Image (cartoon, rainbow, N blue to C red):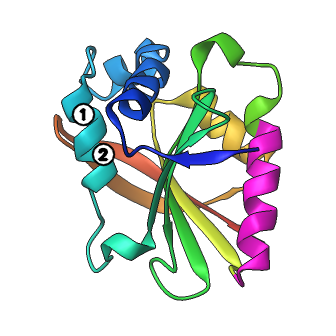
Amino acid sequence: MRLSPVDSREAAGSALDVYLSNPGYFSLIGNPSPTLQDIESDRAALPPDAVPGQKLYRLIDGGDGLIDLIGDYPKPGEAFIGLFMVHGRLHRQGRGRAWMQEIEEMLRETGCRRLRLSVIEENRGALAFWKSLGFEESGRCSAHLPSGELPAVRMEKIL
């Protein structure tokens, strides 16, 4: 797995291609037509009390996927996945599972012991995916999106 920064117009275009290949997700969150501006906003967005150096917004394998991860958040030794997306042409081929196994190993090597994320409640496919990877529900919350707030499920996994 190769992680590369979204730090050029070409990389942003590849990230946008990943977004556009997942229209169901973006319709669900109220943004049926993501743009390069959405890539820039997502790349810069930080949760409360996080600093830019904690954020990893990367293309996976040159645009086959994308991850937005905050290290040492919400506290040291934990990480939070804000977005993990596989290009639509690669769905159901095991790529997401394989990448997550590598990401978990990478995080373990850096001392991370817990991985957290939130899933939009209506996103049944994503809930099933994360549960299949050993994530467990840990509560309910609201996902704060530009289009508003949506009910979400908190999930976590001990690494």
Residue kind at label 2, given as amino acid type: Asp
Residue 147, x across and y down, in percent = 16, 34
**Label 2 sits on residue:** 42
**Of helix, strand and loop, which one carries label 1?**
helix
Check the image and report above or below for 121 versus 154: above
Q: Which residues are magenta?
A: 97-111
What secondary structure prevails in the magenta region? helix
Image x and y of residue 96, in percent: 73, 35
The residue indicated by pointer 1 is: 38
Q: Position of residue 44 (x, y in %)?
A: 26, 55
Residue type of the residue flagged with mark 1: Asp
**Between 115 and 50, the one nearer to me in the picture:** 50
Q: In the image, what residue occupies the spot 32% across and 71% down? A: 52
- Classify 80 as above or below 72: above
Q: Identify the residue shown where x is 63% and y is 26%.
A: 64
- Badge 2 crowding class, 10 Å Cα cut-off, few under 14, some 14 to 19, many 20 or more, is some
Q: Is residue 143 visible?
A: yes
* Relative height, residue 56 to residue 37 (above, below): below
**Magenta stretch contains residue 145:** no
Q: Residues within 10 Å of mark 1 (few under 14, many from 20)?
A: some
Q: Locate the N terminus by quadrant.
A: top right
